[in-house]
Image: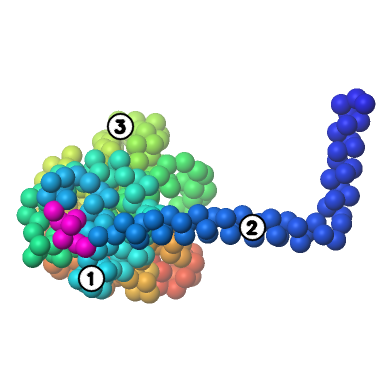
Amino acid sequence: MTHRLRSAAKYDVKSKIKNTRLYRPLCGARQWLSEVRLRLRELSQSTKWHISLKPSSVYVGALQQSPGSLEAWISLAGALKRENNLDCDIVELLKNHKILGPNSVAMRHEDELSRILAVDFSHAAAVLTQTNKRDVVKAIVQKLVAKKTILLCRDAHTVGGYYADAEPYMGRQWDKIIYPLIRGYDFSAVLELAPGHGRNTEKLRHLAKEIHLVDVNATCIEACERRFGMEKNGCKFFYYVNDGNFLSAIKSASISFVYSFDSMVHFDKLVVKDYLTEFKRVMRPSALGFVHHSNYGEIRPNSDWATNYGTRSDLSAKLFSEYCKEIGLKVVHQRLLGLQDWIGMEGLDCISIFQKL
């Protein structure tokens, strides 16, 4: 039998099987068995994990000896949770961000998180005692959640066609939403955070003398550098890859205007708070900032952006204002965005304009 005849015969057999009444039920049963096997594997791992659980005092001792163990810090947080010795908001963070358990999302990034948080772990372990373990773990969990969300958000926006798909909508967003709010501002030295592939930058460059583009994604910075170079039509460009929540490469009191649109909606509230502290440092006196951020935290506080509607973070307009007040920035205007702004839900996002006092 020739290869062509064998292929035809095989196709004919497959077609007959698919046309039988048992085909769909058998496929369904096969899928169900696969799900059962997966669930049994997870239960087995969970059982082994639960058997190995220890009281928090054991993990405190272990961390004093070996402060760099991400697993030990997570285990200490889990022990304090079991002992009802954690604040409710920290318990929610641990649950919603899947930090605990044998399938911990954080442990999937153990090497990178351990490296990034090595200094924080060392400093925390140096002051860790049986009496202050609750407060120390609270600070570590917040740093861990912030860095975990940065890594996941970075990786989610490294590849894909989102930037090209979003480019055609930039014109109407700029004309109808953005420019009416920022007309007349000082664009002499602009900081644009998380520019993606530069669709906002293309609008800003016609107003600015210089733009400092900062992104945790090296691929985005490379795309912007290819697009704009070092100078274009009188506007100079400076490029920086940062760690995801700090602006260490930007000089203090050097920026006249801070700008971010359609990026910080994904930033966890803890990351946004870090950035607001940095904005205050780099902004000139009386400088203004324009930030497009999530308001979904009004509905789901302490949630994970990756599982939220529109991958929005747990920030809210109210919390943004509270952070600004705490840091020493003044919110001068806020506007909720919704269906009339081509956003998928009423009040999903917010634009906040703030000023350095």
Residue where numbered disc 1 is placed? 83
Q: How many marks?
A: 3
Q: Which residues are magenta?
A: 55-61
Q: Is residue 114 magenta?
A: no
Front tag of 2 and 3: 2
Amino acid type, mark 2: Leu
Q: Give the residue type at disc 1.
A: Glu
Read off the residue under disc 3: 231
* Closer to us: 255 or 100: 100
Quadrant position of residue 145 = bottom left
Few, some or many C-alpha atoms within 10 Å of disc 2 (few <14, some 14-19, many ≥20)?
few
Instruction: Name which residue lies at 23% across and 73% down.
Output: 84
Magenta stretch encompasses residue 59 = yes
Tag 3: amino acid = Glu
Which residue position holds label 2? 33
* Residue 338: quarter of image: bottom left
Q: Main secondary structure of the magenta part?
A: helix
Real-space Cα separation, disc 2 to disc 3, in angstroms: 60 Å
Quadrant assignment for the C terminus: bottom left
* Residue found at x 37% / y 69%: 296
Position of residue 9 in the picture relative to residue 329 (left or right): right
